[in-house]
Image (cartoon, grey):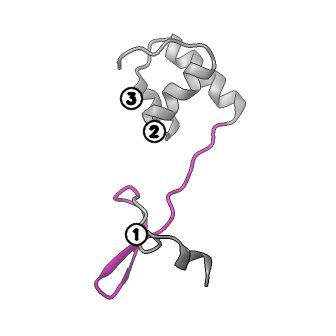
Amino acid sequence: MGALAQLSNHHAPIETSPDEPVETTGERVVRTMQRQTRLTPTQIESLAKDRALGYTINQLASLYHIHRTTVMSHLKRMGGQRLSS
């Protein structure tokens, strides 16, 4: 038995953003894997500096092409306070 056959949700599509490539197989829509953006240590320092300059969490997420919770996680790891955006 293959590894996918052992998983209960092996047919579940992967959710991606609307602009991600989508493949259709008959009636079923299969989404390709979501791309991850990994920030370099220099980018993370820049993100923290931008936050200190007054950028909101949403602005930083858009600027660095990452999710807002990722922004908050980076700031928390660097010792920043979570402020509402």
Q: Earlier in the sequence, mark 2 or mark 1?
A: 1
Task: Determine the residue located farthest toward the bottom in the rendered image.
Answer: 26
Give the amino acid type for the residue marked by disc 1 in the picture: Ala
Q: Residue at x 41, y 14 (%)?
A: 83
Which mark is drawn over residue 63?
none
Quadrant of the image occupied by residue 80: top right
46 sits to left or right of 69: right
CB contact under 8 Å: marks 2 and 1: no
Q: Which residue is mark 1?
A: 12
In the picture of the structure, the residue carrying the numbered disc 2 is 67
Left or right: residue 7 compared with residue 77: left
Q: Secondary structure at mark 2?
A: loop
What count of labels does the image hold?
Answer: 3
Q: What element does badge 1 sit on?
A: loop
Image: magenta residue range: 16-39
Find the distance from the CA under tag 1 to the CA under tag 3. 29 Å
Percent position (x, y) of residue 77? Answer: 62, 22
Q: Which residue is mark 3?
A: 58
The numbered mark, 1 or 3, whose residue comes first in the sequence reads: 1
x, y percent for residue 48: 58, 19
Q: Nearer the viewer, residue 18 or 27?
A: 27
Q: Amino acid at mark 3?
A: Asn
- Quarter in which the C terminus is drawn: top left
